[in-house]
């Protein structure tokens, strides 16, 4: 990859919650939602962030967009440091990162017309006014495959897929460098998922935007992503290029995730080895010692509960944090 | 333009009969209140001790008292007409004052959280634990009676209910993704509160406001009854009724007519409020 600044660079980012008592409440336990995370995303690249609920995916996304401050580490967007930036600078950086949410029914204001929703970032940032604004909104609507006349309608008058198109139009209004897609298709009908995914790909080709694609649907990830990162209890346990990742998953947690993906062919499905993980995801307020995964890992030995494995590079380019894989 | 007119026509046709009826009642009361000086058949303060406590339809020297007279022989119809203005304006103004104060505080507490939330919500608890009428009596006792002071006292003692509702609703709406999207778009607190949170919590607040509207008329009546509200000989529905209470056995009409007017006003405001709450929600409009 080139020397141009990465769209996103995370260095040793940690985000913790709680621990401080309030006026009338005693201090609670510290929840270590994200720990020691490093990640780079290049221009026009799509990186998938995979993990089960509660592993810190959403916290990490909030940190990247600047809604959640990390306790340590560095977050750089297009080479600009977000952590510790003053308000004005933070505001400038923020326009380069936008977000698409899981449920399009909740991510549009039911009392605002679609046009007003898409226009908001343009108005707030002073990009356009009056007629120019109207034209800008119309162009954005067309870009996501909606008719410009739809601007006067309210969200409830649209289908789920159309709403998600509106959400995408709003996210692209400020021409961001990075869009975080938080499960953008999991709330949609299967029939419209492919349309939305294809739209995202087409928009990337045209604008060169990068995506951080948060998902636990590995089928979708395979369809759209260049690289995959697997997260477990606030840490990355495996990072690899898509093809390497799907051809040869290494971390036992990744293998378990993969084995849970249903196959279209029933013969393959029946012959498939299923790895069933025992137990629940441990609480991030009380992360197991050593390798956080050792409580549920089929390969775990003594060392796993004592020493935390670091991410190490493998011959095929993947990076894995495991003593045994 | 044409489509807009058509759409308006469609919406007008969909207004339920009950809403049309109560709108007419409400409008009639408002018009009577405004034009009382021209509509009233007699001077509402003019006493006629020969015509004390006479029933509806009583005639004396060619003057007909359509709704009867009160204990000082004043024409009840005229007093009720004049009283409409006082009751309406006290209720409307104090609802405006208390909802402005209450909603602002509630949204601020719910949005900014932290210390300001603790201060505002404890203040609400304190206000709610003091009987409103007692607080009003104390304040009027210190400030002295008068129309504007009455409005201020009612407005500034009745805000906590709005604050509670606005606060709870704001907490709920603030967590929805579309608010996060606005923050990402770069919108400041003022824009988010006004453009996104307020429209989405307006429904429940409207219901509180209509309930409070009726209560305000009654509070005004109570304070006037204690001599702390509207000063005689000026009339409000509350003060007419509180005087009439003493003569209930002999002269039912003194309480009955302003009472029926009060009932009609509060009822129509409540029905209108319900309808308006649905109407400001784009989801309930024609699809």
Image (cartoon, helix red, strand yellow):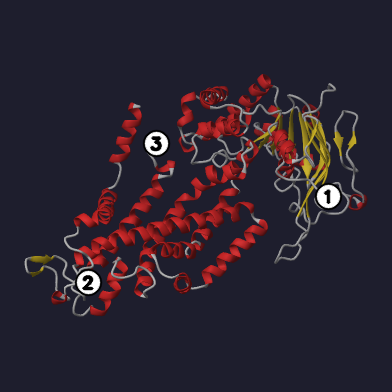
Subunit of mark 1? A
CA gap between label 3 and label 1 equals 52 Å
For disc 3, the marked residue is: B287
Q: Mark 3 or mark 1, which is nearer to you?
A: 3
Query: Would you identify the image quadrant in which residue B70 lies?
Result: bottom left
- Asked if both marks, 2 and 3, belong to the same chain, the answer given is yes
Considering the numbered disc 2 on the image, is that residue within a helix, a strand or a loop? helix
**Observer-nearest of A56 and B10:** B10
Q: Residue at x 48, y 74 (%)?
A: B138
Instruction: Please state, as top left, top right, bottom left or bottom right, where the C terminus of chain B lies in the image.
Output: top left
CA gap between label 1 and label 2 equals 80 Å
Query: Would you identify the image quadrant in which residue A179 lies?
Result: top right
Q: Position of residue B104 (x, y in %)?
A: 54, 53
Q: Could one spot residue A249 in this view of the protein?
A: no
Subunit of mark 2? B
Subunit of mark 3? B
Q: Position of residue B254 (x, y in %)?
A: 22, 71
- Asked if both marks, 3 and 1, belong to the same chain, the answer given is no
Q: Residues within 10 Å of mark 2 (few under 14, many from 20)?
A: many
CA gap between label 2 and label 3 equals 50 Å
Q: Residue at x 57, y 36 (%)?
A: A188
- Left or right: A86 with respect to A138? right
Instruction: Please state, as top left, top right, bottom left or bottom right, where the N terminus of chain B lies in the image.
Output: top left
* First along the sequence among labels 2 and 3: 2
For disc 2, the marked residue is: B254
Considering the numbered disc 3 on the image, is that residue within a helix, a strand or a loop? loop
Q: Is residue B208 above or below residue B275?
A: below
For disc 1, the marked residue is: A292
Q: Are marks 1 and 2 in contact (CB under 8 Å)?
A: no
């Amino acid at each position: 990859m080139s020397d141009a600044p990465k769209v996103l660079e995370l260095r040793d980012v940690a985000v913790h919650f709680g621990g401080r008592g309030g006026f009338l409440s005693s201090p609670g336990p510290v929840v270590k939602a994200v720990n020691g995370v490093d990640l780079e995303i290049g221009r026009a690249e799509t990186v998938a962030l995979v993990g089960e609920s509660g592993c810190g995916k959403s916290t990490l996304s909030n940190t990247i967009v600047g809604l959640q401050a990390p306790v340590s580490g560095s977050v750089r967007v297009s080479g600009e440091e977000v952590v510790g930036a003053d308000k004005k600078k933070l505001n400038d950086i923020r326009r380069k990162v936008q977000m698409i949410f899981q449920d399009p029914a909740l991510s549009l204001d039911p009392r605002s017309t679609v046009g007003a929703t898409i226009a908001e970032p343009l108005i707030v940032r002073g990009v356009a006014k009056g007629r120019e604004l109207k034209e800008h909104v119309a162009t954005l609507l067309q870009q996501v495959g909606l008719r410009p006349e739809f601007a006067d309608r309210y969200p409830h008058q649209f289908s789920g897929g159309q709403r998600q198109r509106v959400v995408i139009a709003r996210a692209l209004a400020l021409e961001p460098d990075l869009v975080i897609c938080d499960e953008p298709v999991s709330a949609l009908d299967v029939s419209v998922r492919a349309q939305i995914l294809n739209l995202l790909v087409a928009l990337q080709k045209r604008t060169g935007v990068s995506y951080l694609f948060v998902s636990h649907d590995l089928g979708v990830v395979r369809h759209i992503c260049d690289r995959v990162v697997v997260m477990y209890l606030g840490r990355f346990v495996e990072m690899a290029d898509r093809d390497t990742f799907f051809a040869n998953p290494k971390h036992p947690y990744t293998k378990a995730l993969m084995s849970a993906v249903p196959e279209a062919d029933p013969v393959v499905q029946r012959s498939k080895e299923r790895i069933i993980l025992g137990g629940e995801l441990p609480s991030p307020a009380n992360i197991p010692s050593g390798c956080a995964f050792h409580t549920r890992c089929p390969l775990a030995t003594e060392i796993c509960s004592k020493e935390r494995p670091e991410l190490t590079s493998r011959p095929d380019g993947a990076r894995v944090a495991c003593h045994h894989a | 333009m044409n489509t807009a007119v058509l759409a308006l026509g469609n919406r007008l046709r969909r207004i339920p009969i009950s809403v049309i009826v109560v709108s007419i009642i409400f409008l009639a009361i408002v018009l009577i209140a405004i034009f009382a000086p021209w509509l009233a058949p007699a001077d509402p303060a003019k006493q006629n001790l020969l015509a004390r406590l006479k029933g509806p339809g009583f005639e004396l020297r060619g003057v007909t008292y359509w709704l009867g007279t009160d204990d000082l022989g004043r024409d009840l119809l005229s007093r009720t007409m004049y009283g409409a203005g006082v009751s309406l304006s006290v209720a409307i103004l104090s609802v405006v004052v208390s909802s402005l104060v209450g909603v602002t505080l509630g949204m601020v507490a719910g949005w900014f959280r932290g210390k300001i939330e603790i201060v505002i919500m404890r203040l609400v608890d304190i206000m709610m634990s003091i009987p409103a009428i007692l607080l009003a009596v104390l304040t009027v006792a210190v400030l002295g009676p008068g129309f504007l002071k009455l409005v201020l006292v009612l407005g500034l003692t009745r805000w906590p209910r709005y604050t509670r509702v606005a606060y709870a609703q704001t907490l709920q709406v603030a967590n929805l993704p579309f608010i996060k999207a606005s923050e990402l778009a770069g919108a400041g607190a003022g824009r988010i509160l006004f453009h996104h949170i307020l429209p989405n919590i307006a429904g429940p607040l409207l219901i509180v406001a209509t309930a409070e509207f009726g209560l305000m008329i009654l509070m005004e009546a109570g304070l006037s009854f204690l001599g702390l509200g509207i000063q005689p000989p000026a009339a409000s529905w509350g003060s007419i009724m509180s005087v009439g209470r003493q003569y209930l056995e002999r002269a039912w009409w003194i309480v009955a007519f302003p009472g029926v007017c009060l009932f009609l006003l509060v009822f129509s405001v409540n029905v209108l409020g319900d309808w308006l709450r649905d109407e400001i929600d784009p989801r309930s409009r024609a699809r």
